[in-house]
Amino acid sequence: MKKLLIAILCLCAMSASAAGVKPGSVKTLVDSCGFFPQISPDGQWLLYSPTDATSLLLKNLSTGQVTTVASKGYPGFDAIFGPDGKVYYVTQERKNNGLVFRTGHCYDPATGKNQVVLKPQHGRVEPLHATAGVVVNGERQYYRSGDRVGAYAYTRGSSLYLVDENGVTRALQPVKRSNGYLWASLSPDGTKVMFEASARGLYVCDLNGKILANLGQFLMPCWYNDNYIIAMSNAGNTRTSGSRIWLLSVDGETCKPLTPDSERAVQPMVSDGKVVYTLQYSGQVKQLELDIHAAVAATAVATGKGKTEKVKNPAATKDVPRVFVNPGHGGHDSDDRHVPTWVIGAQDTLHYYESNSNLTKGLALEEILTNKGYEVVMSRHTNTTEDDLDLFEIVSLAANSGADIFFSIHSNATGIDKRINFPLALYRGCDGQPVVEGSLKLSKAVMKHAASNELAVWTHDERSRGDWSFYPDWGYQVGLGVLRYNKLPGMLSEGSFHDYLPERERLLSDSYCWLEAWNQSLGIDEYFGRSGKFKNGVLAGTVRWADLYREDEDTRQFGADKQRTINGALLRLYNDRGALNRIFTVDNLDNGVFVFTNLAPEKYRLEMLYGGEKRYITTRVKVKKNKTSYKNLTLKKDQKPK
């Protein structure tokens, strides 16, 4: 579907209706490192940020002088100009308990004065354009730049919110089955709403939520006037060509590229008929003019003093940790790692896709963390081509969620004959020097618990690396796209190597994927200082033959993985009083995995049977709260019951 839409866009670009619009002059405003650029309403100032939002810069376009508006709290990316010419932006601070609190600010270029307009609060805080002013919108409190700021729109999860001139809020859900909404805004005349439904496309609806147009796959849309929209390309993770800036008409008739594909132009913004954008890797900022009439500037501007008010029905009533979970990839597309695997137990070739195990882990982590009292936001719940989101789209969903951490789930592969297996965490920055404070602490905590998994055979110790150091050949500070522009404390977990055959067989087990998610939750508990708060624990292990060895063509197995696993073994768990507590049957996928979840912390007797009652072993185990207990079992072919 996504590839078809891209093809349609290319055809649309040559349509007669688009041919009448011509780009005018183009000039360079910043030579490098200028991301998320925008021009002030009077055309005098350019606002932009370095790649990783570490500062917010303001350039006087007449004199060339650059002023630092803010240099702490990752102030870039969310900043906007109000119709009064002032800059509204948000900073964040990570507390000792791992929660992120965000503060709203206002900077006046005319006086050089900065002021706090919204005190720190947990959750999402963002500056929004209203029809006559600015709203710095928080989940518990919000700030208005004047007595009456007019109407505005914003998004939270899979809901679109419209606030009218009287402050009355309505929630709409124009598109079903979306992973979340982004970039909502009212048209200049206030009659239409534009928004992006993640994995579904760019839409325009009326004020009642009735869809007027689906314009295809685009990102970061902004109104040029009541009839035209400027946006950037969105081809998902299947993209092989560069990004472009597009001109779209709300009736769907015009779809025209304004920049050459070779530029890789991104992050458009419109002001006073001028389109500014940045080049993806260099950060060069350019300005483009069109030969169509721009939107008329708002005649009504908010008057009176700004005011902070409480949200009548706050989205959050308690400051509990909020985690954004991104199960990597989506759909069995070209960027998904597909490995056909002959499984002796199943007597068939099974098809391993990384997107499958990533989603299994993600859904398990969502359930586990929710049961532990966390709030969880997911980038996807299904595994289709439409779920293979553009990396910037994922980053934007994470920012819009108001999360405290960003957690991306993957598995790894060497891509060569060398076989290794270890947990790897990647964070934005150089080794030992994360761009966003807290990322290294999170990575180390998660990797410690991932490496404690005694079902896996690890060839190396766990590692936490900065993506700039790990991928030096990609270019200066390029790194992973899903971490680029992400100002949340965050990491990408390469939980293990799926091209190591025994590990891939384990990843075919939903129970093993659940166990990885459980161990990830223990690392997240440690990061937030919540270890031990969950009362129950987990018992896990493998069952292998003590005297039967693998004879695969791929003989690069290590340690216990050289032994054959026991398919179809039966595990019985009895409590300390002798009552049967649980039963687990090992699958036939050559992994020997068993996992007992949500166990009360006490002593148990574990019994394994194979081939009826003729061969079995029993052992004692102890389960502790919010911890994983391990018991790997081996059985000899002629072993007698004991």
Image: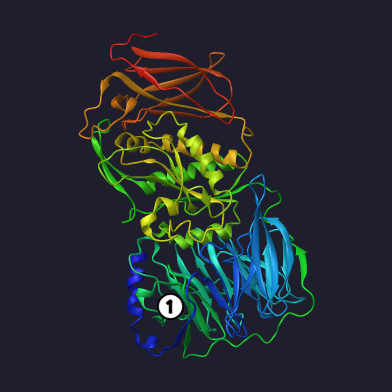
In the image, what residue type sits under mark 1?
Answer: Trp
Is residue 365 found left or right of 586 in the rendered image? Answer: right
Provide residue 180's location: percent of width, then percent of height: 52, 60
Is residue 179 positioned above or below 147 on the image? above
Figure quadrant of residue 544: top left
Q: In which quarter of the image is residue 456?
A: top left
Which quarter of the rendered picture does the N terminus lie within? Answer: bottom left
Q: Residue at x 73, y 78 (%)?
A: 111
**Residue 407 appearing in the image:** no
Which image quarter is the C terminus in?
top left
Q: Position of residue 52 (x, y in %)?
A: 53, 61
Q: In this view, does 619 lie to the left or right of 210?
A: left
Q: Is residue 300 visible?
A: yes
Percent of width and height locating residue 124: 63, 59
Q: Among all residues in the image, which is located at the extreme left?
A: 553
Q: Residue at x 29, y 38 (%)?
A: 419
Q: In this view, does 227 lie above or below 124?
A: below
Image height check: is 26 above or below 532? below
**Which of the 4 quarters of the picture holds residue 280?**
bottom left
Q: Residues within 10 Å of mark 1 (few under 14, many from 20)?
A: many
> For mark 1, what is the residue?
246
Pick out the residue farthest to the right.
Answer: 304
Q: Which of 434 and 532 is in front in this view?
A: 434
